[in-house]
Amino acid sequence: MTPVTLYQFALCPYCHKVRAGLEAKGIVYRTVEVNPMNKRGLPPLPEGAPRKVPVLDWGGEVIFDSTVILKALDQKAPGGVRLLPESAAALARTEEVEDWVDDALTFALPTVIYGTWKEAFNAAQVTARTSNFGPVQNLMVRAGGSLIMHQVVKRILKKHNETDAHAWVAREIDRFEAWLGEQPFVCGASPSLGDIATHGALSCIADFPIYAELMKRPRLAAWFERVRALRAIPAIEMHRD
Ligand SMILES: N[C@@H](CCC(=O)N[C@@H](CS)C(=O)NCC(=O)O)C(=O)O
């Protein structure tokens, strides 16, 4: 079996996209939790690669960028969910949904996680607890993380011309549910890239109140459970320094 290692941050939506893809393909993998501040834990990267996660080591081949990684998986592991459908129309739709995850959903979600001071303070504690910070960095994140994230959220809202974070997220999820319609998955009867990417990004927020809020939406919740059932193989090891 090819050894597969995902270098990740616990709260990175792009890493969760890759986790969802690996699990839906039935690929056994281990994770390495990279330090978000100094990036300690990252493997040597290919020339030109940004010092970002996710990075996947597939038996010595290092691949970066969640979209590139997900799109490589069908070829690397033919089992499990087929991420890239054969039909051109289905492929276009599933890529549209995956683009939406990267361009809209991953920006909208933090604005409700860190949007108000109270949300930002609570979220900073979750971040400190789950991420691989050293002890001093951990204290800094607990104390100052909410301040920084609150500023980041203000910038995201401005850049995306949004003023009401909760209304923005609701509109994005409306869009996803419209893609689903009455179908089990975004391309119809079979799950694909768009489902897996969205499931990953939403799994990333499971520790935050917005997750429970969103799961009150019956169509989204039923789809979420359908995809969860496909994610057969969880990570086997969590390595932290
Ligand atoms: N387009 C990349 C985005 C990856 C990305 O932005 N990762 C963030 C974590 S969520 C990161 O590593 N940031 C570190 C930094 O910018 O220094 C992908 O899809 O993998």
Image (cartoon, helix red, strand yellow):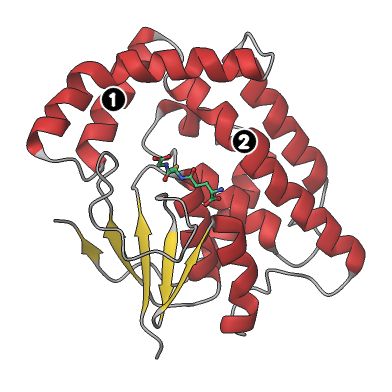
The answer to whether 88 is drawn above or below residue 214 in the figure is: below
| Relative height, residue 117 to residue 212 (above, below) | above
Label 2 to label 1, Cα distance in Å? 20 Å
Mark 2: secondary structure: helix
Q: Are marks 2 and 1 in contact (CB under 8 Å)?
A: no
Q: Mark 2 vs mark 1: which is more N-terminal?
A: 2
State which quadrant residue 227 falls in.
Answer: bottom right
When asked about the image quadrant of residue 158, the answer is top right
Mark 1 Cα-neighbour bin, 10 Å: few <14, some 14–19, many ≥20: many
Which quarter of the image is occupied by the N terminus? Answer: bottom left
Q: Which mark is residue 124?
A: 1
Residue at 59% across / 27% down in the picture?
A: 108
Quarter of the figure with the C terminus: bottom left
State whether label 2 is within 8 Å of ligand 1: no
Q: Tell me the residue at 22%/26% (across/down).
A: 141
The residue that label 2 is drawn on is: 105
View extreme (left): residue: 135
Q: Is residue 52 left or right of residue 176?
A: left
Disc 1, SS:
helix
Looking at the picture, does residue 106 appear above or below residue 25?
above
Q: Amino acid at mark 2?
A: Leu
Viewer-closest of 62 and 193: 62
The answer to whether residue 85 is left or right of residue 145 is right
Return the residue nearer the eye: 131 or 234: 131
Above or below, 98 against 164 in this view is below
How many numbered marks appear?
A: 2
